Image (spheres, rainbow, N blue to C red):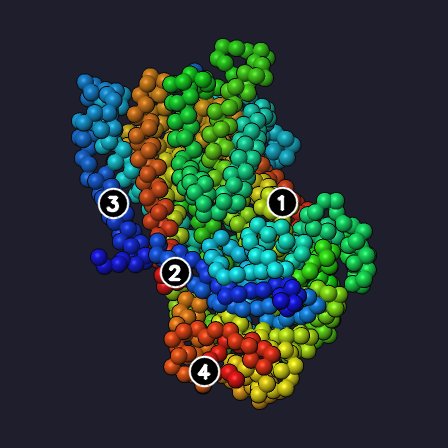
C-alpha cells in the first residue's frame, strides 16, 4: 500500500470535514417550510425511525428543525465572523503601522470592548437595533474581533522588524509594495485561520443570545430558540428536545474547531515540511 | 498608577456614553413599554407627563448629562419592571450573583489548576491526552446547554436538586436558610465553573510544561530533585500566580457565563436581571447593569495587574 | 589493574538516540551520541571539545541520567568501578556527581539565590553555603538576590558553589564560558582548576578549544556525537604531528593562530549518519575499510583514537 504522508492525510481529512459541514448547511437550507410544519397528532413524540430526534410540543419534527436552525445559525455566524475578521484585519494593521497615537487609541478601544462582558454587550446592541436578526449580527460582529486584531497587530509588528522588510524599505520600495509582497502573504493565512476559528465561537454566541430571547423571532427555527423552548418542557420528560439538538450543535462546533486546527497546521510553514 | 486610574475612568466613561447612545438609538419606545407594564389605560395627558418626567423629548446630549449627573449622585433611576430604584436592585442581585460567581470561580480555579498540574506532569501520557480532549470538548459546549443537561439529569431525572430559583418557592426571603441557598446554588455554580475551568486547566498545563522543560528544572533534576520536589519547589512557584492572574483577568467571561447560567436556572442575579431588562425594555436597569458589569470587569483586571506586579521580582524590586 | 582503580568514570561505546514522532505514527531514530569512549581520573580536568550542535550537552545529561523520556541509552557507564545504573544515577546525582550549568537561566527566576544554592536537602546547609559564598567572594547580601540581579560572574560562582556544597567527586561543567569576557572565563576556569587540584575530577564540555588547551589535562575531541581522539592537552600545543586523528589535526589547523584553514564539508546530521567512521566522508586519508565499519578505539602514543590510519 502506498504510504500517505501526514500532511496529505490532514488535507484529505479537512476536505472531508468541510464537505460534511457544507452538506449539513445545504441540507438545512433546502428543507422546505412544510417539513417543519406542526401537527398536533404528532406532538411530543420521543425519537423514532420516523422522527429520529422526536417531535416538539407542537408536533414539529425536531431533526428538520435542528438542521434548519443550524443552517440559520451558520449563516449568521459566517456573516458575523466575516465582518468581525474584516474589522480585526483593518484594526490590527492600523494599530501596527499607524502612529503610536493610533496604536494607543486602538488598544484603548480593544480594552473597551473587552471591558464589557460580551453577552451583556450583545444584549445591549441587540436592544439598540430593536432585537431581531440585524442586532444579533452586528452584536456578534462587534464583539469578536479583539483577539484576532491583537494577533494581527503582533504579527505585523514582528514582520516589520524583519530584516527583509527593512531591506525592501532601504531599496526604496513603497509602503504599499511592502504590504502586498511581504505582509499580505503572512497575513492572509492568519486571516483565514482566525476566521475559521472565530466561526464556531460566533455560532455559540448566536445560540446563547437567541436562547435568551434576543435576536431571531420565536417562529424561526434557530438552535437557541429550539433549546429555549425545550427548557419549558424539560420537567415533563421531553429530554430529546434538549439533548439531541444541543448535541448536534456541539458536534458541529467541534467539527469546525477541528477544521480550523487542521487548516492552521496546513498553512503553518513550520509544519508544512512534514 | 495615576495613568492606570485615568485609563480605567476613561473606559468607564466611554462605556456609559456608548451604552447610553445604544439605548437611545433603539427603535423600541421605552415609554410605551413602561405604559404596557403598568397594565392600566393611560390618557394622552398622563403619557405626556411620563415623557416629560423621563425627558424623552429632550436632545440626547442633555438627557445623557442629566442621567450622568444623577448617576454620580448614586441615582441610577427607577427600574420599569421592578418599580424600584435600579441601585437597590443591583445591590441585592449582585449579592446573589457574587455568591454564584465566587463559588464557580473558586471551583473552576481549584479544579482547573489541579487538572492542569496533572496534565503538565504527565505530558503526552494517557491521562494528559484524555483530560486535554475533555477540556477541548468542554470549551465547545455552550454554557446554557450544559446547564440544561444538568437540570435534566440532576433535577428532572435524579430529583437531587430543585429546578430554578435561589430559594424554595413560597418561602419568605427572611425564612430562607443559608443551607437552602447553598443547595440552590450548587448546580448553577457547577455549570458556570465547568465552562471556565477548561481554559485555566489548559493554560496551567502549558505553563507547567514550559517550566518542566526549562533549564532551571533540568538543573534541579541534575541536583537530584525528584518529580514531586520539582513540582512543589519550582512548578507551583512559577505557575500559581500566572494562573491566579488569568483567573482575575477572566471576570468578563465569568460574568457573561453567569448571564447564561442564571437564566437557565432562574437564579435571581444580575444576569437574569439584564436579560429581563433587555427583553422588557427596562432602559435604566439595562444601563445600570451594563455599567456595573464593566466596573466588575475593571476591578478584575486591576487586581490582575497588581498581582502581576507583586509576583514578578523584577517588577517588585524596581518598585521598591 | 591499578589504572582501573584510579578511574572515576569510564564510558564505553555510549550511544544516545531519540525517538521522534514527527510524522504521525512513523518513528525516526536520531542518534546524537554514538560509540562514545571516555575515561576520567580523579584530580584531572578532561575537556570535551567539539563544534556546536554535536550533542556534547546531552553527554552530561546521559551521565546524570536526566535525558528526556524519548531518549534511549546504550553502552556502559562505570562510576568508581561500578555499573552506573539508573538507580545509582538517581542516588549519585546532586551528591557525588554534580552539574555546573552555563548560565543564570539554570536558576529558578522566582527563587532567592541563597535558598536555591542550598538545594532541596533538609536541613538546609546554610552555614556551609555561607562560608562557600565567602570563599567564592560573593557578597553576604547575594543570598537575598533573585537570579536576575546577579552579574554573569556572580551567577557562575553561585552555580559553582552548588557543586562544592555537596562535595561532588565528579563535576561536569557544561559550556561554562560562552558570553563571558576573557577575564571572567579565566576566573571561571581557575575555579575548576582549583576543584580538580582538590582531588575531584572535572569534565569540561566546551567548544572553546583555546581555553580547553590552557586548562585541561586531557582533551577529548568530539565529532558528530563521538570522541574521535583523547589526547594529553600538551599534544595540542605541540602541533598536528603530535595528534592522532585527521579531524583533530584539521581542527588544529582551523584555529586562527594556526592558519585558519577550514575543513571542507559539514558534520553529518544525526538522522543521517554514515555507516563506518563518522569522519570518513570528509577525511583526506580515507581508506575503503573506513566506510564499512566504525574503527575500534586504539591506544596510540599515549592517547586514544578511533581511526584505522593513525600511527
Q: Chain of mark 1?
A: B
Q: Tag 4: Cα neighbours inside 10 Å, few (<14), some, or many (≥20)?
A: some
Number of other residues with Cα within 10 Å of mark 3, as a class: few under 14, some 14 to 19, many 20 or more: some
> Can residue B61 be seen by looking at this rendering?
no
CA separation in Å, label 1 and label 3:
49 Å
Camera-nearest label, 1 or 4: 4
Tag 2–tag 4 contact (CB < 8 Å): no
Q: Is residue A260 visible?
A: yes
In the rendered image, residues at marks 4 and 3 fall on the same chain: no
- Disc 1: which residue: B229
Q: Mark 4 or mark 3: which is in front?
A: 4
Does B224 sit left or right of C297 as displayed? right
Task: Tell me the element at label 4.
Answer: loop
Q: Are marks 3 and 2 on the same chain?
A: no
Q: Which residue is mark 2?
A: C28
Residue A223 relative to residue A52: left or right = right
Q: Quadrant of residue A215?
A: top left
Question: Residue sitting at 61 percent across and 32 percent down?
Answer: B70
Dots 4, 3 in contact, CB < 8 A: no
Nearer the observer, disc 2 or disc 4?
A: 4
The reply to whether discs 3 and 2 touch (Cβ–Cβ < 8 Å) is no
> Do marks 2 and 1 share a chain?
no
On the image, the x and y values in percent for residue A67 come to 25, 36
Which residue in the structure is indicated by mark 4?
C283
Give x and y (percent) for residue A193: 38, 53
Q: Which of the numbered marks, if any, corresponds to residue A20? A: 3
Amino acid at each position: 500500500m502506498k504510504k500517505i504522508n501526514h500532511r496529505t492525510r490532514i488535507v484529505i481529512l479537512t476536505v472531508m470535514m468541510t464537505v460534511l459541514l457544507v452538506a449539513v448547511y445545504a441540507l438545512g437550507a433546502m428543507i422546505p417550510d412544510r417539513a417543519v410544519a406542526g401537527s398536533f397528532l404528532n406532538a411530543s413524540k420521543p425519537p423514532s425511525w420516523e422522527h429520529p430526534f422526536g417531535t416538539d410540543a407542537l408536533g414539529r419534527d425536531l431533526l428538520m428543525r435542528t438542521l434548519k436552525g443550524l443552517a440559520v445559525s451558520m449563516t449568521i455566524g459566517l456573516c458575523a465572523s466575516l465582518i468581525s475578521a474584516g474589522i480585526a484585519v483593518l484594526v490590527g494593521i492600523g494599530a501596527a503601522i499607524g502612529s503610536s497615537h493610533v496604536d494607543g487609541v486602538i488598544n484603548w478601544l480593544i480594552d473597551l470592548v473587552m471591558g464589557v462582558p460580551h453577552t451583556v454587550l450583545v444584549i445591549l446592541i441587540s436592544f439598540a437595533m430593536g432585537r431581531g436578526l440585524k442586532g444579533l449580527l452586528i452584536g456578534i460582529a462587534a464583539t469578536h474581533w479583539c483577539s484576532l486584531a491583537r494577533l494581527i497587530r503582533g504579527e505585523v509588528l514582528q514582520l516589520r522588524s524583519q530584516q527583509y522588510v527593512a531591506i525592501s524599505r532601504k531599496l526604496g520600495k513603497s509602503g504599499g509594495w511592502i504590504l502586498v509582497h511581504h505582509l499580505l502573504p503572512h497575513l492572509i493565512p492568519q486571516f483565514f485561520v482566525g476566521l475559521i476559528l472565530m466561526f464556531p465561537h460566533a455560532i455559540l454566541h448566536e445560540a446563547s443570545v437567541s436562547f435568551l430571547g434576543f435576536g431571531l423571532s420565536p417562529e424561526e427555527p434557530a438552535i437557541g430558540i429550539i433549546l429555549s423552548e425545550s427548557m419549558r418542557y424539560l420537567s415533563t420528560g421531553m429530554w430529546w428536545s434538549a439533548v439531541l439538538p444541543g448535541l448536534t450543535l456541539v458536534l458541529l462546533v467541534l467539527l469546525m474547531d477541528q477544521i480550523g486546527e487542521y487548516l492552521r497546521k496546513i498553512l503553518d510553514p513550520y509544519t508544512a515540511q512534514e | 498608577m495615576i495613568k492606570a486610574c485615568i485609563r480605567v475612568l476613561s473606559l468607564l466613561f466611554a462605556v456609559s456614553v456608548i451604552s447610553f447612545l445604544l439605548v437611545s438609538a433603539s427603535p423600541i419606545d421605552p415609554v410605551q413599554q413602561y405604559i404596557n407594564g403598568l397594565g392600566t389605560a393611560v390618557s394622552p395627558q398622563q403619557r405626556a407627563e411620563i415623557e416629560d418626567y423621563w425627558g424623552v423629548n429632550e436632545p440626547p446630549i442633555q438627557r445623557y448629562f442629566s442621567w450622568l449627573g444623577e448617576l454620580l449622585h448614586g441615582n441610577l433611576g427607577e427600574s420599569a419592571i421592578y418599580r424600584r430604584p435600579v441601585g437597590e436592585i443591583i445591590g441585592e442581585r449582585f449579592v446573589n450573583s457574587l455568591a454564584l460567581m465566587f463559588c464557580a470561580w473558586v471551583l473552576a480555579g481549584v479544579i482547573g489548576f489541579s487538572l492542569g498540574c496533572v496534565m503538565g506532569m504527565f505530558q503526552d501520557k494517557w491521562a494528559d491526552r484524555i483530560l486535554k480532549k475533555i477540556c477541548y470538548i468542554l470549551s465547545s459546549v455552550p454554557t446554557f446547554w450544559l446547564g440544561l443537561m444538568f437540570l435534566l439529569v440532576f433535577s428532572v431525572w435524579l430529583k437531587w436538586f430543585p429546578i430554578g430559583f435561589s430559594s424554595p418557592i413560597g418561602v419568605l426571603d427572611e425564612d430562607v436558610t443559608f443551607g437552602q441557598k447553598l443547595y440552590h446554588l450548587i448546580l448553577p455554580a457547577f455549570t458556570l465553573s465547568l465552562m471556565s475551568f477548561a481554559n485555566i486547566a489548559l493554560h496551567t498545563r502549558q505553563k507547567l510544561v514550559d517550566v518542566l522543560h526549562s533549564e532551571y528544572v533540568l538543573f534541579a533534576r541534575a541536583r537530584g530533585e525528584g518529580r514531586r520536589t520539582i513540582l512543589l519547589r519550582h512548578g507551583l512557584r512559577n505557575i500559581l500566580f500566572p494562573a491566579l492572574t488569568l483567573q482575575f483577568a477572566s471576570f468578563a467571561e465569568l460574568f457573561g457565563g453567569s448571564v447564561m447560567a442564571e437564566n437557565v436556572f432562574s437564579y435571581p442575579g444580575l444576569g437574569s436581571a439584564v436579560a429581563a431588562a433587555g427583553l422588557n425594555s427596562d432602559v435604566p436597569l439595562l444601563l445600570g447593569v451594563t455599567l456595573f458589569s464593566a466596573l466588575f470587569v475593571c476591578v478584575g483586571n486591576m487586581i490582575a495587574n497588581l498581582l502581576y506586579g507583586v509576583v514578578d521580582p523584577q517588577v517588585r524590586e524596581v518598585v521598591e | 589493574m591499578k589504572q582501573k582503580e584510579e578511574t572515576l568514570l569510564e564510558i564505553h561505546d555510549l550511544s544516545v538516540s531519540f525517538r521522534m514522532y514527527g510524522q504521525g505514527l512513523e518513528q525516526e531514530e536520531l542518534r546524537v551520541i554514538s560509540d562514545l569512549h571516555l575515561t576520567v581520573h580523579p584530580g584531572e580536568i578532561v575537556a570535551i571539545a567539539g563544534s556546536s550542535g554535536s550533542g556534547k550537552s546531552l553527554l552530561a545529561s546521559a551521565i546524570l541520567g536526566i535525558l528526556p523520556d524519548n531518549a534511549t541509552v546504550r553502552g556502559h557507564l562505570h562510576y568508581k568501578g561500578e555499573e552506573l545504573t539508573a538507580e545509582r544515577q538517581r542516588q549519585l546525582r546532586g551528591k557525588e556527581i554534580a552539574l555546573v550549568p552555563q548560565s543564570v537561566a539554570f536558576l529558578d527566576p522566582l527563587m532567592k539565590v541563597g535558598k536555591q544554592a542550598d538545594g532541596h536537602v533538609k536541613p538546609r546547609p546554610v552555614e556551609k553555603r555561607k562560608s562557600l559564598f565567602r570563599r567564592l567572594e560573593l557578597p553576604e547580601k547575594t543570598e537575598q538576590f533573585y537570579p536576575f540581579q546577579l552579574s554573569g560572574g556572580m551567577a557562575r560562582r553561585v552555580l559553582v558553589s552548588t557543586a562544592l556544597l555537596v562535595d561532588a567527586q565528579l563535576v561536569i561543567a557544561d559550556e561554562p564560558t560562552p558570553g563571558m569576557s576573557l577575564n571572567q572565563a579565566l576566573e571561571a576556569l581557575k575555579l575548576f582548576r582549583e576543584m580538580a587540584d582538590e582531588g575531584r575530577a572535572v569534565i569540561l564540555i566546551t567548544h572553546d578549544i583555546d581555553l580547553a588547551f590552557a586548562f585541561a589535562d586531557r582533551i577529548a575531541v568530539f565529532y558528530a556525537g563521538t570522541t574521535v581522539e583523547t589526547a594529553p592537552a600538551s599534544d595540542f600545543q605541540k602541533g598536528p604531528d603530535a595528534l592522532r586523528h585527521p579531524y583533530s589535526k584539521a581542527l588544529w589547523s582551523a584555529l586562527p593562530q594556526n592558519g585558519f584553514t577550514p575543513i571542507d564539508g559539514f558534520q553529518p546530521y544525526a538522522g543521517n549518519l554514515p555507516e563506518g567512521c563518522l569522519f570518513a566522508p570528509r577525511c583526506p586519508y580515507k581508506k575503503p575499510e573506513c566506510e564499512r565499519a566504525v574503527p575500534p578505539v586504539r591506544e596510540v602514543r599515549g592517547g586514544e583514537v578511533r581511526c584505522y590510519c593513525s600511527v
